[in-house]
Image (tube, helix red, strand yellow):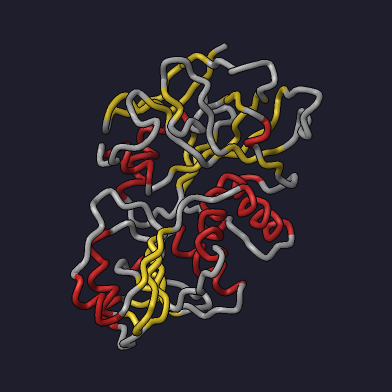
Amino acid sequence: METHAVVLQDPMGISLQSVPLIPANTSDAIVQVRHSGISTGTEKLLWSGQMPPFPGMGYPLIPGYEAMGEVVEVASNSNLRAGDEVFIPGANCFGDVRGLFGAAAATVATDPKRLVKLEAGFGTQGALLALAATARHAIAAPGASLPDLIVGHGALGRLLARFTVLRGGTPTVWEIDPQRRAGDHGYDVLAPDTDASAEYRCIYDATGDAGLLNTLIGKLAKGGEIVLAGFYPDPVSFAFPPAFMKEARLRIAAEWTRQDMIATVSLMNAGKLVLDDLITHRAAASDAVDAYRTAFTDASCLKMILDWDGAI
């Protein structure tokens, strides 16, 4: 079997190619991808060549860990059935082409236990489940404090804010781009240099910019916490004396867990968490080269979705 997939041959060398589809074993589910999202965090680092050494890293590779689709084949002992709509966190089923993360393809084969069943009708927003679950993971970690400041109002920053509001918080958000500050969000979105507040108890950074750390420490209350919720390609360092004086605490939030997925799906099912408005751009998979460039270079793009149906 073969399938079409987005392939990063090397940094900046992106194309749509036909690649082998090799199920690992007979129990793998075969899923037809409907929609896949483009991550402006980790995928941008793979595209630009800035990704630091990472397990499974290497070229050529198929990116993508945000996809939803329909089960085509699955073993009879699985909890899934043909026709089920599912979230696909990625796949590694493409022969010599690495699956990191492997969801930007027309068809994938993967262990059905990795898939998350979606309610019929979730549609495109089902592809955003991983990003939403990642935000939930940061907010809902054991002992985690709700942020009173979130840095960055891209898709991840907005999701962090939404989970904060759902839990009864009222965050302030910093955003340097005027386009991303616009609108009525239910919380304040400010240019950082206009924020007169002197101290925050808990700051979540969603930018992936390690250079902001000294600035954020300066905004902390004594004993406050900074949560690194993005992905940071550069070494994270900070001036010790200000952090010492503040008795600052630092926490790193990693990717989602299965429980985060389940909890996030439950909120979506209940209509408490809506993701459709985060999708600002869409393109046919056949236009993937331009779509990836737009996702990574156009500040107005919160989330780019590739549509795979009928696009090849």
Residue under the image location 44 percent in, 79 percent down: 188
- Using residue 192 as the reference point, say whether residue 31 is left or right of it: right
Q: Position of residue 198 (x, y in %)?
A: 31, 87
Quarter holding the N terminus is top right
Residue under the image location 29 percent in, 40 percent down: 51
Q: Which residue reaches farthest top?
A: 1
- Using residue 65 as the reference point, say whether residue 288 is left or right of it: left
Q: Position of residue 161 (x, y in %)?
A: 50, 69
- Using residue 178 as the reference point, say whether residue 163 is left or right of it: right
Up-down: is 1 above or below 303?
above
Q: Which residue reaches farthest right?
A: 76
Residue under the image location 36 percent in, 33 percent down: 289
Q: How many marks?
A: 0
Q: Position of residue 246 (x, y in %)?
A: 29, 81
Q: Position of residue 220 (x, y in %)?
A: 33, 80
Looking at the image, which is closer to me, 27 or 164? Answer: 27
- Using residue 299 as the reference point, say whether residue 309 is left or right of it: right
Residue 287 is drawn in which quadrant? top left
Looking at the image, which is closer to me, 105 or 138? Answer: 138
Residue 39 is drawn in which quadrant? top left
Up-down: is 256 above or below 226?
above
Residue under the image location 49 percent in, 32 percent down: 104
Looking at the image, which is closer to me, 143 or 304? Answer: 143
